[in-house]
Image: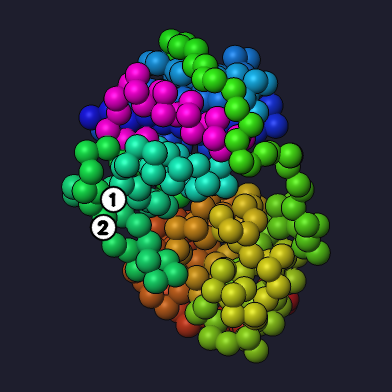
Amino acid sequence: MKALLVGEYREGKLLDSTYELFGFAAQLGAETAMLLIGSEDQLPACGGTLYLADAGKYGEYNPDLHKRLIVAAVERENPDYIVFLHSSYGWDLAPRVAATLRAAQVSEIIGIADGGFEVTCCNAKMRRAVQPATARTVLTIQAGAFPAAMPGGSPRLERLDVEDGAGAVVFVGYEPAEKKDVDLAKAEVIVSAGRGVGKKENVPVIAALARALGGELGASRPVVDAGWVEHSHQVGTTGQTESPKLYAACGISGAIQHLAGMKKSDFVVAINKDKDAPIGEVADVLVVADVMQFVPALTAKIQK
C-alpha cells in the first residue's frame, strides 16, 4: 500500500501541519512519498521520495497548475491514496484531482476503520465508516485528528515540471482574518461554553467563571451557530486555535474539530455529565457533574 502525501507551503514556509500527513500514513501502514510545491530551503525532515516543484514558478496556489503537478507525481508513483490536509488548500484541490483521476474522494477523515475511514456526520454529532469503491482514492484528513509524526532523514528529491498555463483561477494573495474583539490565541486561561449549558441565558454563568479565573470566554461551534456567543469566541478548526495554560470545557462533548482547536493547551479541565464524552479522553481532569450546578459552586469558591 502506498500513499502520496501532499505537503503545504504558505508564505515561504513549510506548514507544521504537513507532519500530520505522516502520522496518518503511519496509522494506515502505508509506504509514503511526498509532493511539495515549495522551496528547497524548506523541506520536510523525511526519508523517501520527495517530488518538488518550485513555488516561485508555479505559485503557492494555482489550481490548474498544482493539479497537473499532482497528477504528474501520481503517474510516476502510482499510489493507492493521494492525501491532503483538510485545509483551504486541500478542500479546494482534492476534488479537482479526484475528478481528473476518476477516483473516489473521502473528505475530513478523523480515524481509520476496518476496511475504510471514519468521518463525521450530523454536524459532527455522529461518526460513520466509509469504504472507497475505487482502486485509487483521494483523501483529506481533519486537522488535529492524527498526531504529527516526523520520520527524520533526508528526502530523495525528484524535480517536477509541467507546461505553464494561467488557468481559470488566479491566486492574488492572502487576506488577513478580520480583527476579532477577543484574541483567544493570547489568553492564558480560556473557559468555554458548550451545548451542555442548555440555553443562551446560562452563558453568563460560564463567563463568570472565566472572569474569576482571570481568563476569556470561549465557545464551541454549536453555541456560536445558535447565536448564544459571538463568533470571535469560537474555539476549533473553524474558529481560533489556542494554546492556553488552562482550558476549561463546560458542557462540551468534544467533537474532533473542537479538540483540534484546543489540543495544545497545557492543562485541560472538562465538566460534563456524560462520563464517556470524548472530551474526557484528552482532559487532565474530568468532572462528571451537571455544568449548571457545578460551575456556580466552583466560581463562588474561587471568588472567596
Is residue 63 a member of the stretch shown in magenta? yes
Q: Residue at x 50, y 70 (%)?
A: 252
Tell me the tag on residue 129: 2
Labels 1 & 2 near each other (Cβ < 8 A): yes
Disc 1 and disc 2: Cα gap in Å? 5 Å
Q: Determine whether, in the image, residue 117 is placed left or right of residue 240.
A: left
> Which quarter of the picture shows residue 11?
top right
Which residue extends farthest left? 115
Is residue 141 a member of the stretch shown in magenta? no
Viewer-nearest residue: 138 or 186? 138
Where are the magenta residues, as a range? 61-82
Viewer-nearest residue: 183 or 248? 183
> Which quarter of the picture shows residue 220?
bottom right
Tell me the tag on residue 117: 1
Residue 22 in picture, x, y percent from top left: 40, 32
Magenta region, main secondary structure: helix
Q: In what quadrant of the picture does the N terminus appear?
A: top left
Q: Earlier in the sequence, mark 1 or mark 2?
A: 1
> Which quarter of the picture shows residue 239?
bottom right
Q: Determine whether, in the image, residue 9 is placed left or right of residue 29.
A: right
Tell me the tag on residue 176: none
Kind of residue sitting beneath label 2: Ala
Is 205 located above or below residue 239 in the figure?
Answer: below
Q: Is residue 277 visible?
A: no
Q: Residue at x 54, y 35 (%)?
A: 64
Is 234 located above or below residue 71 in the figure?
Answer: below
